[in-house]
């Protein structure tokens, strides 16, 4: 997929090479870094490195099925066997069955993960069981809960995790502190995905967070090759949004041939509303639906011929697009206390082009951030205050 995956050693910087090749095989590590710093690439390469160093019994665990399929599409040169890539919930369910239990039947994701942790812990305690794996590698580690982190360390001799606190989009996630206490830190500081305009927008949102490190100063993105842009678009109706989205896809597919384009919906409700429009459109042959449901029925293998990925915000975790379209941005507030980080995560899926569609008033922080990206306003005078705003 264009420049998403490393294909030769020269693409790694010194920090990334250190994290792949210089760390011990026997210690646990937590690799932190901003969006686009190469964390997922690094995990896959590290998995291959560990396999060659006699750690044969390892798994790479991801948070959702979309990311599982995305990682399975990486270059063949360092692709893991398909059976060694798994979602965390499928991992826990299999272990529960192997130990004679029954996984949670709850349809509420957070309830199910807490229940599965309790079930598996009880089964392991009965057998006094530990260390069933040489290594567990975790992607998007910021969204695991403490009980899951405890189980990972109980089940594996070594845990190698990667994540970013800025992209934590699940309100129940509390495992990062536990992970940081039990694994040695490795920091990635440079990032390559997000264009300067996208960095600026993300920084406007993240600047209020404690210990936030801005993206713009450490961006290694090549603006000369692909000039970045952010275009907020207020629509008068859902029909107008659909019309403008289709036009946006026309432009993006023509401008970036062969590269992945994203359509990101805040929730399944908005995804289900836009899908029929896209399926009946001139872009239907390009479509690939990905969402965050747990049974995997709404996921497709990433195919070279399908270049428009339609997904929920949760389903977009870990993905990246040459251009992204966020629809119904006003509905990001449905993520409640996680909405700022959800916005940040959605924005930083885009490499070069970002279009933000809204049909109603966006949350204040997102509206203000978009306004700061607009063309500088003329000097304010007393006289101008009595003029009508356009």
Image (spheres, rainbow, N blue to C red):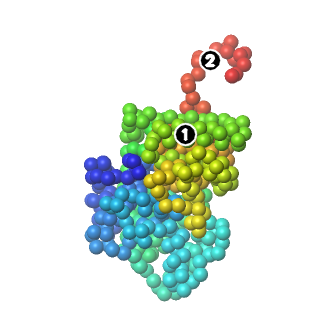
Query: Residue at point 41% right, 51% down?
Result: 1
Check disc 2: other Cα within 10 Å, few if <14, some if 14-19, many if 20+.
few
Question: How many callouts does the rendering have?
Answer: 2
Residue 373 location, x and y as percent?
Answer: 55, 32
For residue 137, side relative to residue 21 (left or right) = right
Q: Is residue 121 visible?
A: no
Label 2 residue SS: loop
Above or below residue 204? Residue 174 is below
Q: Is residue 192 visible?
A: yes
State the CA–CA distance, disc 1 to disc 2: 39 Å
Above or below residue 365? Residue 375 is above
Query: Residue at point 28% right, 52% down?
Result: 8
Residue 16 location, x and y as percent?
Answer: 32, 52
Q: Which one is in front, 363 or 261?
A: 261
Instruction: Give me the disc on residue 374.
Output: none
Residue 328 location, x and y as percent?
Answer: 66, 45
* Residue topped by disc 2: 380
Label 1 residue SS: helix
Above or below residue 94? Residue 225 is above
**Of the two numbered discs 1 and 2 in the rendering, the one whose residue sits closer to the viewer:** 1
Residue 132: quadrant of the picture: bottom left
* Residue topped by disc 1: 250
Please report whichever mark, 1 or 2, sits nearer to the chain's N-terminal start. 1
Query: Residue at point 39% right, 39% down?
Result: 221
């Amino acid at each position: 997929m264009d420049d998403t995956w490393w294909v030769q050693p020269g693409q790694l910087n010194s920090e990334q090479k250190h994290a792949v090749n210089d760390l011990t095989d026997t210690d646990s590590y937590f690799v932190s870094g901003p969006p686009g710093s190469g964390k997922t690439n690094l995990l896959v390469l590290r998995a291959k490195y560990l396999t060659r160093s006699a750690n044969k019994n390892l798994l790479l665990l991801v948070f959702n099925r979309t990311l599982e399929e995305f990682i399975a599409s990486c270059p063949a040169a360092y692709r893991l066997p398909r059976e060694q890539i798994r979602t965390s919930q499928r991992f826990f369910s299999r272990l529960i069955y192997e130990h004679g239990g029954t996984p949670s039947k709850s349809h509420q994701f957070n309830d199910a993960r807490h229940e599965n942790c309790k079930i598996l812990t009880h089964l392991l305690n009965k057998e006094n069981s530990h260390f069933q794996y040489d290594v567990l590698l975790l992607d998007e580690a910021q969204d695991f809960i403490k009980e899951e982190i405890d189980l990972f360390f109980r089940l594996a001799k070594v845990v190698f995790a990667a994540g970013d606190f800025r992209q934590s989009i699940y309100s129940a996630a509390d495992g990062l502190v536990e992970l940081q206490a039990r694994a040695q830190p490795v920091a990635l500081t440079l990032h390559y995905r997000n264009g300067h305009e996208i960095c600026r927008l993300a920084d406007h949102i993240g600047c209020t967070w404690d210990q936030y490190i801005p993206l713009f100063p450490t961006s290694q993105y090549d603006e000369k090759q692909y000039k970045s842009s952010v275009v907020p678009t207020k629509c008068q109706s859902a029909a107008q949004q659909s019309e403008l989205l289709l036009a946006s896809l026309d432009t993006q597919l023509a401008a970036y041939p062969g590269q992945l384009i994203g359509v990101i919906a805040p929730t399944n409700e908005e995804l289900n509303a836009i899908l029929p429009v896209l399926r009946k459109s001139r872009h239907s042959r390009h479509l690939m639906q990905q969402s965050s449901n747990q049974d995997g029925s709404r996921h497709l293998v990433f195919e070279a011929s399908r270049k428009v990925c339609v997904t929920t915000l949760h389903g977009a975790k870990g993905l990246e697009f040459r251009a992204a379209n966020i629809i119904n941005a006003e509905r990001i507030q449905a993520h409640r206390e996680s909405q700022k980080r959800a916005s940040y995560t959605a924005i930083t899926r885009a490499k070069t082009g970002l279009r933000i569609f809204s049909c109603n008033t966006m949350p204040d922080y997102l509206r203000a951030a978009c306004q700061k990206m607009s063309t500088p306003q003329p000097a304010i005078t007393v006289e101008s205050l009595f003029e009508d705003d356009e």
